[in-house]
Image (cartoon, helix red, strand yellow):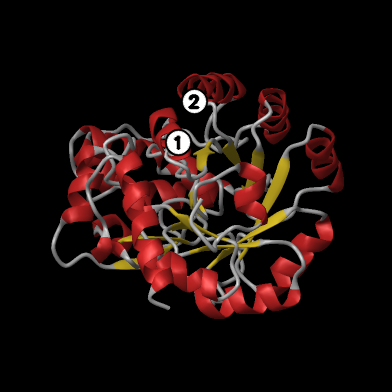
Amino acid sequence: MILALENQIIKVLGLKGPLILSPLAGGPSTPELISAVSNAGGLGSLGLAYETPEQIRATIQKTRNLTSKPIAVNLFVPTKTPELKPEQINQAIEVTKKYREELGVPSPKLEPPYALDFDQQFEEMLSQKPEIFSFTFGLLPDHYIKECKKNHIITCGTATTLEEGILAEESGVDWLVAQGIEAGGHRGIFSSTEEDSGIGLFPLVRSLVHKLKIPVIAAGGIMDGAGIAAVLALGAKAAQLGTAFLLCEEAGTSKPYREALLSKNRKTKTTRAFSGRIARGLENRFMNEMETENILPFPAQNVFTRDIRKRSAELGKSDFLSLWSGQGIELIREMKAGRLVAVLFEELRTATLSQ
């Protein structure tokens, strides 16, 4: 444990320092990455929102075989299935026709449901008893929180505004992730249709720490120990890093994704192009060309573009991939996950001593 940094989260989980790996759903999240972070003294989080109950069970069990340390499991709060009109689907097919022709992908059939059954996912998660269950995209009804408490599983919500944070605390969550606009991947906004408030991590953390009684975890653009020290100074009890781990050997980050993360002139921005929900990633052709098009609502758009993204990865092209990345991308490093955790803790120790 890093001297003078002990707090509730570190104590409860027995961590070496206040570091949590973001749940990197959609590929980068692997049992090897999560276990390596947990074994090194951080908290590894499995992003399992796109996994079937059978896959959830197998992934958690494989992770358990690789570490005896605490782990977190993350799922998406269920969204009401959007009702799409035939003309909406036809327009979406027409807009993306040129991409499918270029990639050699047949025209898709888009039928509901557009997401996996959350209750089945939740029940499987519950049966595997991870130490922490985290979720994003809103609030969970009371009975889910009660089930977690009954099974001694810590619950962790996500908020992008003070208002969301207050509602999360009132819902009974134990901890809360404060996700600043700098964060890579999907924005944890409660509404899938409203615009992003765009609040930066520092003012968000300060307002939540000032107002809430539960521990706040800071997420968004944090890439090194100095960044962790900065959010701790603002009152956060831990920092959650995702982009920083994308180039780790153990991450399931695809080859074209890795190449894009290391490319020159890397720029990130938010988009709805890939999933219908606002998310931050590296700019690429699909993101920029789809900016002016009508996008299907989440999660229909996510299912609709999956074949394009899959084929793009198979062909080694990053033009059509969702290259989720935070604003701190210039600070990304290539090394094994356990080594990166050790480096981050050493940087944190140095930054803390110099304050």
Q: Nearer the viewer, residue 174 or 76?
A: 174
Q: Position of residue 40 (x, y in %)?
A: 42, 39
Q: Residue at x 47, y 33 (%)?
A: 109
Q: Nearer the viewer, residue 266 or 82?
A: 266
In this view, which residue lies farthest toward the left? 264
Query: Mark 1: which amino acid?
Result: Ile
Q: Residue at x 36, y 36 (%)?
A: 307
Q: Position of residue 112 (x, y in %)?
A: 61, 36
> Disc count in the image?
2
| N-term-proximal mark, 2 vs 1 | 1
Q: Position of residue 38 (x, y in %)?
A: 48, 38
Q: Residue at x 61, y 33 (%)?
A: 116
Mark 2: which secondary structure? helix
Contact, CB < 8 Å: mark 2 with mark 1?
A: yes
Tell me the distance, in whole angstroms, between the alpha carbons under discs 2 and 1.
7 Å
Q: Which residue is mark 1?
A: 34
Q: Residues within 10 Å of mark 1 (few under 14, many from 20)?
A: many
In the rendered view, tell whether residue 87 sits above or below residue 110: below
Q: Residue at x 51, y 24 (%)?
A: 59
Query: Mark 2: which amino acid?
Result: Thr
Q: Nearer the viewer, residue 285 or 354?
A: 354
Mark 1: which secondary structure? helix
In the rendered view, tell whether residue 80 sits above or below residue 215: above
Q: Position of residue 83 (x, y in %)?
A: 65, 48
The answer to whether one can see residue 59 in this image is yes
Return the mark for residue 210: none
Q: Residues within 10 Å of mark 2 (few under 14, many from 20)?
A: many
Image quadrant in which the C terminus is located: bottom left
Q: Which residue is mark 2?
A: 63
